[in-house]
Structures are given as structure tokens and as C-alpha cells.
Amino acid sequence: MGNPSELDTSKAAENGEGELSYEEKLNFVSCIAKPMASRKFSKKIYKLIKKSSKQKNYLRSGLKDVQRRIRKGETGIVVFAGDVTPLDVMVHMPGVCENKQIPYVYTPSRTDLGAAMGVKRGCLMMLVRKHDDYQDLFDEVSKDIAALDNQP
């Protein structure tokens, strides 16, 4: 385990704090993960997720729940994890979001998405709905996503 050429767990131990850096997480991201949030923007997204998790029914997490809610007409911001394997399980969702005019963005790690929500388990995707308590942050994140890539 002390060999630095082993998997990402040894890299995490080398880092000293037990966690991979943003650049190291980008090494595990799939090729379709675009638009990718920057380090600073990812932190802003995680803050929005944390605030929305305190409101009941304003944060949808997981592939099945997000997919069902989007098809039923719910809107908001969709946040995808970039390190999903196998990719086939969620490769259709960006197309669904574009058809429904829902802004979306990728973050490097599914474990960070789960941690932002307050659970120890990772999460593939989340749908954050608009609420009065975090309206300003929601609007700011939505505007920044539109600026990343020419999305609605």
C-alpha cells in the first residue's frame, strides 16, 4: 500500500489530508463530461446542494428519481458526476436535459456530490429546484452554467 503507483487510494494517502485534489479527480472523469465546473464553481455548486438539501422535496438525487421528475416536468439545475462508470447508465441524460431546456453541469466526483447532500454514499446526478431561501445562489449558479457552454 505504500507504493505510490497503486490506485487512487494511495494518492489520497500521499496528499496528507486523505482526499484527492481537484486535478487528481479530473484524471478519473469520462470523456463526455462537458461542461465541467471549475474548482471554485464546484464549491459553489456543492454549497447550493447543501442549502437545498435542508428543504424538503427541493433536491432530487439519483438516476431514477431525477429522470422521473424531469419527465414529469420538474425544472431546476441538474448536476452530474463526471466519474461515473459504466457510462451507459446516464449517457442519455444530457440530451434529455437539452430537450427540456434544463441547464446542467458536471462536477468531477460522485462522492463529493453525495457529501454535499450529507450522505456518505456517492450520487450520480442531482436535480436542484428553485426555492426562496437560496434564490440568489440558485440564480448565480444558473447564470454561470449558461456562461460555461451555450446552454439554455
Image: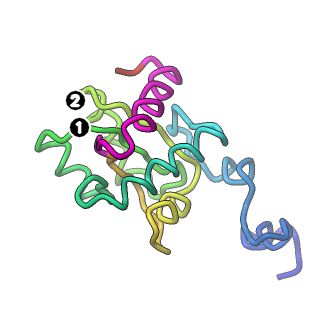
Residue 49 x, y percent position in the rendering: 43, 52
- Left or right of 124: which side holds 109? right
- Left or right of 118: which side holds 99? left
Pointers 1 and 2 in contact (C-beta within 8 Å):
yes
**56 lies above or below 125:** below
Q: Residue most toward the top?
A: 150
Quadrant containing the C terminus in the rendered view:
top left
The amino acid on which the numbered mark 2 sits, given as a three-letter code, is Lys
Mark toward the viewer: 1 or 2:
1
Q: Quadrant of residue 65?
A: bottom left
The front one of 102 and 133 is 133
Q: Is residue 130 magenta?
A: yes
The amino acid on which the numbered mark 1 sits, given as a three-letter code, is Thr
Residue 6 x, y percent position in the rendering: 79, 71
Task: Classify mark 1: residues with Cα within 10 Å, few (<14), some (14-19) or many (20+).
Answer: some
Judging by the rendered image, the residue that carries numbered circle 1 is 75
Residue range in magenta is 129-150
